[in-house]
Amino acid sequence: MHELPVTQSIIRIAKEEAEKHKVNKVLEIRIAVGELTGLMPNCIQHYFDIASRGTVVEGAKLIINKVPVAVRCNNCNSESEIDKSKGYGCPVCGHSDIKIIRGNEFLIQSLEVE
């Protein structure tokens, strides 16, 4: 249920930006959600539909781009996307000394407004 406060933050930020730029209507909100966040896009959409009622973002299309997990191997210096079901070792050399470089993010990428 941690999607509710996250969704409320999306709405708050979009409303603030709309107000700052004197926008009447937000038509689309594009967000990036990393696989490691544990956030469920369908729950975000559900909460968005409810929490945005009566606001400048009501009815906006919410586009959720899932960001896969990617790592940099400290052994062979390769950067690769990984399949979490196969573990968190380097897909190139198999070493476990890796750094996650993508997949934790949660951000608003863009707003389309009227």
Image (cartoon, rainbow, N blue to C red):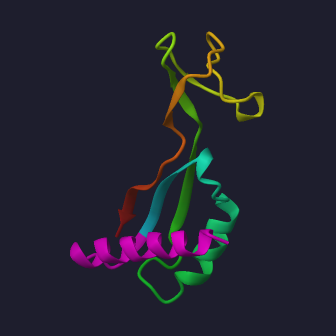
Residue plotted at (61% across, 19% down): 90
Which is more toward the observer, 54 or 68? 68
Residue furthest to the left in view is: 21
Nearest the viewer among 111 and 16 is 16
User: Can you say whether 19 is above or below 110 in the image?
Assistant: below
- Extent of the magenta region: 1-26
Question: Percent from the top left, x then y, of residue 9?
Answer: 45, 72
Outermost residue toward the front?
97
The residue depicted at 62 percent of the width and 75 percent of the height is 47
Is residue 111 found left or right of 67 in the rendered image? left
Where 109 sits versus 23, above or below? above
Asked whether 16 falls inside the magenta stretch, the response is: yes
Q: Quadrant of the N terminus?
A: bottom right
Q: Is residue 68 above or below residue 86?
A: below
Q: Is residue 27 above or below residue 89?
A: below
- Name the residue at 54% across, 41% down: 103
- Residue 46 coordinates in the image, percent (x, y): 67, 73
Q: Return the residue found at the far right.
A: 85
Q: Main secondary structure of the magenta part?
A: helix
Residue 65 appears at what percent x and percent y? Answer: 55, 48
- How many labels, in total? 0
- Between residues 32 and 71, which one lies in front from this camera angle? 71
x and y percent of residue 61 in the render?
A: 53, 65
Quarter-wise, where is residue 113 in the image? bottom left
Q: Is residue 34 magenta?
A: no
Q: Residue at x 51, y 13 (%)?
A: 75
